[in-house]
Amino acid sequence: MAVEQIHIAQDVDDKLGERSLREIARWLWAVDCQTCGRFLGDDPPSLCVDDIMILATATLHHQVCRASEWNDSGVLDRTPEAHLSFITGLTMVPTTADGSDHIPMVLLNPSLESVTLEQDAQERWQPRLNLAYRNAGLAPLAADGTVGAPIQGAFARVTEDSLAVSMKSAPFNSYEVPATQQALDAARRHDGVLFAVTQTPHPGEITPESLGRAMQAGEVLVGRVALHGSNAHDAPASASAPVRYPLCEGETATSALQWDDRCAMVGKILGHKARPMTDRKARLWAARIIETAARKAGVPCSLIDWSPLHDEEPGEGWFTMEALQANMFLLRQTTDGWRLVHVYSRRGGGPRFESENEAKAWAFGVLGHQAGIRGLTWKPRPSTPRSNTLYATV
């Protein structure tokens, strides 16, 4: 069930208030500490809020790892999404009045230990789902209970014993759930599935009644997702998908794949600077490139402050996000200079690829679905001490 006891600092209590705190607690689940990544256990976790002006993020931590605080300094004490847990579930939804036919609904809680906050018209902080899912085409259930045409931001796959939904826009993840033969047959019969995203209730403990209450409260986003290869899947992605920033003048279109035992990232290199620079100057250089690219693309840019890709290990790279467009960026220094990567997908929680081929297969899927890039030949390039790096030039 949702977290029941939380350690809250006075400034957090003052800024949120009792009503908002109750709401936020309903959206949080005490699984892993967002500082160290280990299980939170039975002791009440601390609630920390990182306020970046436009929105805020509430996260759970061991009290000894990070004391409860309201952080409005603009500096994040953690790598975004590094230790987040998600959970999937499956239910069958009737498609006929007499219940003679059903369609599978894949349920997702994408963020057990973290929730996005925004202020309402009365400046009260409210939890909400990540806007990336709305950008993909998901929406609150219509008043008449119907679900429209398949969304363009995701596709579904049927395996021998599971159903999966893969995002074609941010956050670019795939979510898989075990399925019975009945559910597999129904997905093929309907040429797809329903996809529902909610942080209340817990998908692993869902009932028709709890799902219905959450939908009535507007706490569920839902959409129809077509099977891979269908006409709906082959249609172009939604215009609201995150912007792909163009390369700097004179740059070659190069894809970068980096992974270690904690996370993996794949994306496009936006800039390369061979001249030696300090960490601080490199981050300023990278921020100028991102802001210039956003201006050329005609979109706003609001970068959060850089943080180490891995805590206390700035030598492994620096990470930031653009808050409004949900774009991610990685800045790394190797023996041949600094490189800035526009990250198309990030896989956290310790990918532990069994082989280099498995890493390349993951990158191939991301680049093919997100950028239409195929047929790349990956080559090793200079890397950081704890990671592996491959580049491929289009």
Image: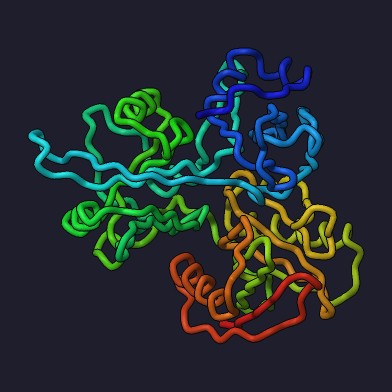
Image: 206 above or below 193: above
Q: Is residue 375 left or right of residue 268?
A: left
Location of residue 185 (image quadrant): bottom left
Of 370 and 259, nearer the camera is 259
Residue occupying the point 48% across, 84% down: 375
Residue 152: image location, x then y, percent: 35, 55
Image: 248 above or below 127: below
Image: 304 above or below 250: above
Residue occupying the point 65% across, 49% down: 83
Image: 24 above or below 196: above
Residue occupying the point 59% across, 29% down: 118
Looking at the rendering, in which quadrant would you find the C terminus?
A: bottom right
Residue extending farthest front: 42
Residue 184: image location, x then y, percent: 24, 57
Residue occupying the point 77% across, 21% down: 9
Q: Is residue 234 visible?
A: no
